[in-house]
């Protein structure tokens, strides 16, 4: 009987499968302090490290970059990681923070609006989960936060990530972060309209220009994919639909609430665009023709920028899962 019991125990031990390791790691944002007029370190008694990173940047011209080093503990599986929480404080109007992972926007959050004349800076709030769970292979990845603030700014305390199957011997936040001024880009098409969007250009984005050097093609329709924001745009030339820009890959899983299609006869054309830029992206778009105003695609939360022309000839920009940059090319300023 003893021999039988020992055999059962040994069999049980040999059949146990080790579950992938799962843990949390956090990073203190004040460690991202750099020489930049839009940011400073603040002492706060209720902050997790007694300090915060104050960001005052109404134009969203700077970013906080965190380098993540991913190495699977079990080499036969990938690592799954997600943002469990971002802790911040705010005293004033709401601010918008966009979050990118390796150049792709994975989420955003809006700070809570408060007006107690400076008394809220030491009261911290938690975003909870931001963005989806990411399944990633071994390598280095860039996590970027861009804040569009009011004139008083906001303060970042710390960010917390959950990682499953990450090798615990490898520091998840593996390189000193960098908070830098974004590079300013000139318009992509000489003489065309405003370039809406200011996120960094990276190799994963597709550059497009629907006009090329041909301005004889007539826009006869437009198709807009709309969710919380403008997801994709597609133009119809001479009654033939062209390529869609945005939502370019099957793994672009961002929700689309509706797709709006508009077609024009020879007496109607687009002559105005209202664009709200939030988080560095063309967030909401309202197109106007010489006969009507089309419904807004996306949810505008700021006053839009208005651009007018005699007649829309085409669009240019950069796109991935989202529209990262968008420029309108008008007959009145074609060069």
Image (tube, rainbow, N blue to C red):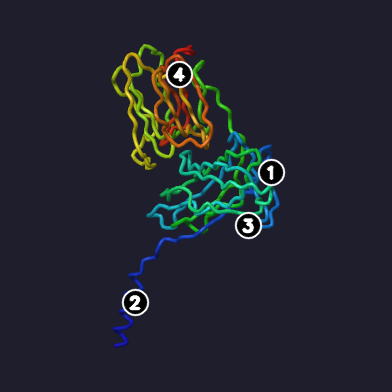
Label 1 vs 2, first from the N-terminus: 2
Q: Identify the residue at image location x=53%, y=45%.
A: 110
Residue that appears at 29% across and 83% down = 4
The residue indicated by pointer 4 is: 329
| Secondary structure category for the residue under label 1 | strand
- Give the distance between the C-alpha atoms of the residues marked 1 and 2, in whole angstroms: 60 Å
Query: Which badge, 2 or 4, is on the more N-terminal residue?
Result: 2
Task: Report the residue marked by disc 2.
Answer: 10
- Mark nearer the viewer, 1 or 2: 1
Horizontal side of 58 relative to 226 (left or right) equals right
Any mark on residue 313, and which?
Answer: none
Could you say where residue 247 lies in the image, as x and y percent from the top left? 37, 35
The answer to the question of whether label 2 and label 3 lie on touching residues, with beta carbons closer than 8 A, is no
Picture coordinates of residue 84, whole percent (x, y): 49, 54
Q: Which mark is residue 40?
A: 1
Mark 3 sits on what residue?
48
Q: How far is disc 1 from disc 3 in space, using C-alphas?
A: 17 Å
- First in sequence, mark 1 or 3: give its number: 1
Contact between marks 1 and 2 (CB within 8 A): the answer is no
For the residues labelled 2 and 3, the Cα–Cα distance comes to 47 Å
Is the residue marked by circle 3 packed among few (<14), some (14-19), or many (20+) residues within 10 Å?
A: few
Query: Outermost residue, right direction?
Result: 43
Disc on the earlier residue, 3 or 4? 3
Label 4: few (<14), some (14–19) or many (≥20) C-alpha neighbours in 10 Å: many
The span from disc 1 to disc 4 (Cα, nearest Å) is 40 Å
- In the depicted structure, whether residue 186 falls above or below residue 160: above
Secondary element under disc 2, as helix, strand or loop, is helix
Question: Mark 3 or 4, which is nearer the eye?
Answer: 4
């Amino acid at each position: 009987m003893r021999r039988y019991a020992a055999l059962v125990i040994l069999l049980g031990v040999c059949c146990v499968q080790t579950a992938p390791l799962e843990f949390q790691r956090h990073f203190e944002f004040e460690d991202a302090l750099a020489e930049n007029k839009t940011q400073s370190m603040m002492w706060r008694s209720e902050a997790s490290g007694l300090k915060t990173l104050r960001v005052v940047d109404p134009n969203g011209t700077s970013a906080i970059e965190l380098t993540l080093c991913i190495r699977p503990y079990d080499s036969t599986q990938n690592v799954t990681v997600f943002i469990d929480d971002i802790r911040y404080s705010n005293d004033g109007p709401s601010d918008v923070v966009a979050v990118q992972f390796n150049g792709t926007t994975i989420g955003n959050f809006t700070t809570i609006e408060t007006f107690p004349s400076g008394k809220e800076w030491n009261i911290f709030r938690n975003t909870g989960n931001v963005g989806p769970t990411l399944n990633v292979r071994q390598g280095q990845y860039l996590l970027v936060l861009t804040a569009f603030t009011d004139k008083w700014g906001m303060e970042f305390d710390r960010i917390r990530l959950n990682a499953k199957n990450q090798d615990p011997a490898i520091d998840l936040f593996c390189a000193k972060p960098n908070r830098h001024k974004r590079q300013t880009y000139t318009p992509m098409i000489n003489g065309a309209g405003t370039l809406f969007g200011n996120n960094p250009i990276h190799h994963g984005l597709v550059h497009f220009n629907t006009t090329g050097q041909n301005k004889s093609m007539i826009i006869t329709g437009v198709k807009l994919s709309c969710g919380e924001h403008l997801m994709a745009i597609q133009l119809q030339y001479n009654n033939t639909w062209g390529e869609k820009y945005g939502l370019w890959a099957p793994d672009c899983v961002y929700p689309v609430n509706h797709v709006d299609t508009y077609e024009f006869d020879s007496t109607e054309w687009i002559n105005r665009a209202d664009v709200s830029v939030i988080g560095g992206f063309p967030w909401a778009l309202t197109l106007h023709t010489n006969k009507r105003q089309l419904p807004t695609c996306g949810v505008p939360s700021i006053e839009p920028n208005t651009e007018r022309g005699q007649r829309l000839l085409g669009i240019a920009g950069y796109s991935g899962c989202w529209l990262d940059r968008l420029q309108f090319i008008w007959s009145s300023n074609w060069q």
